[in-house]
Image: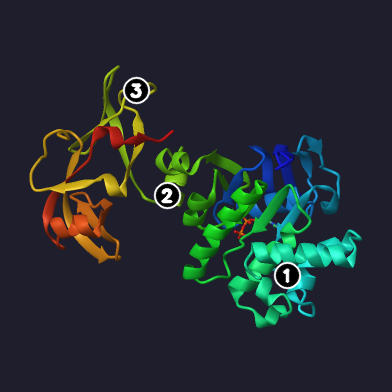
Amino acid sequence: MTGNGAIELIAVSKYYGSTIAVKSIDLKIPAGAYCCLIGPSGCGKTTTLRMIAGHEAISEGDLLIGQRNVTELPPVKRGTSMMFQNYALFPHMSCAENVAFGLRMQGVSPVERAERATEMLARVHMDMFADRKPDQLSGGQQQRIALARALITQPEVLLLDEPLSALDPFLRARMRDELRRLQQDLGITFVHVTHAQDEALALSDMVVVMEDGVIRQKGTPEEIFNRPKSRFIANFMGGQNIFKGKVARADATTTIVERGPDQFVLPVHGDAKTGEDLEFTIRTDLIGLADDIPAGAAQSQIPVEITTVEYLGLWVRIVATTVDGKDITLMKTESEFRRAPVRRKEKFIAYWEPEHAHVLA
Ligand SMILES: Nc1ncnc2c1ncn2[C@@H]1O[C@H](COP(=O)(O)OP(=O)(O)OP(=O)(O)O)[C@@H](O)[C@H]1O
């Protein structure tokens, strides 16, 4: 690892006529990090990736790769390589020729090309398919060839545009593991655009969530998932219930929020003012159901009626509805559920530990 793969975007914007695709974003990706850009359709993640690659001109701002300002440089001079969603393999070339293509462009000798292509094919477990054409390969195999082709020029940065989206769910999980392992072995920076939350959480050192051309939150997968900054992030990443209430009391030890007749205890929230609206989240797997008010959670509970029980294999998803019609989602492991099964129309008290509440900005 050479450490030249650090990326910095400084106030980078992209305009297409009057459309603002990316609005003055600042982002630092450390060398050797696996970074996923995620967000709803049209949020600007692909445009951001293409600007890093040099396939799209930057309208305003600067892009540094390995401390070099590459804003005006063509793609081949940036030390980056791109792997496309549809793999873009050359159909008339064998796998080995596809993989060696970048070296041919660099004027590397045929002998060295063949040697390095064989080595790279072995790295992605495709050496036995060196002589096949792309249309004689499965989707997962084509993906490995595309990866080998992108990596053969030894880029500092690999840019991946939805690399797993063409694969079925089983293969997607396997290729996800392989991508992560390859990235860790090579120690180069990966920037990966995805619309799949599980993919971003599983792969990343750093998750960047975009919306409307701006970065809404960046951090480790644990930060993004457990401490979403806003309702948008909590909804988009999933796994959370969002509650809204009015602050009834806030002092140095507790914040109490009321919602109709229900009262919730939140961790101390310095900025909370009596009477103001406040939103907080509780993870779907951290809510319990009890017949009676349980000890220790006396003030964070709501009476509910079970409306849906969905068996998902490892998990059981339960939807419970409050008296005023708010749905709460609970996830129980199958074994938890078997110890304490619930059925539609049964009534319970939903409760949680106050420290599991996370206040939204
Ligand atoms: N060539 C173009 N000309 C005009 N507008 C464009 C062009 N490319 C992208 N846009 C617009 O820029 C915005 C961001 O597009 P971008 O492709 O970056 O989004 P995305 O987050 O990657 O979406 P998706 O997940 O659907 O691929 C969108 O509003 C899109 O319509």
Closest to the camera, between mark 2 and mark 1, is: 1
* Mark with earlier residue (1, 3): 1
Which corner quadrant of the figure contains ligand 1? Answer: bottom right
Specify the quadrant of the image occupied by residue 294: top left
At a point 69% along the width and 49% down the height, the residue shown is: 48
Q: Nearer the viewer, residue 167 or 346?
A: 167
Q: Amino acid at mark 1?
A: Ala
Q: What residue do we see at 26% from left, 65% from top?
A: 310
Residue at mark 2: 235
Which numbered disc, 2 or 1, marks the residue that appears first in the sequence? 1
Can residue 350 be spotted in the picture?
Answer: yes
Residue 16 makes an appearance in the image: no
Mark 2 or 3, nearer chain start:
2
Give the alpha-carbon distance from disc 2 to disc 1, as whole Å.
34 Å
The residue tagged 3 is: 273
Type of residue at label 3?
Lys
Label 1 residue SS: loop
Front position in the image: 144 or 212? 144
- In the drawing, does residue 57 fall left or right of residue 338? right
Q: Where does residue 62 sit, x and y in percent of width and height?
A: 77, 38
Measured in 3D between alpha carbons, the distance from the residue under mark 2 to the one under mark 3, in whole angstroms, is 25 Å
Rendered image: mark on residue 88: 1
**Taking 311 as reference, is 279 left or right?**
right
Q: Amino acid at mark 2?
A: Asn
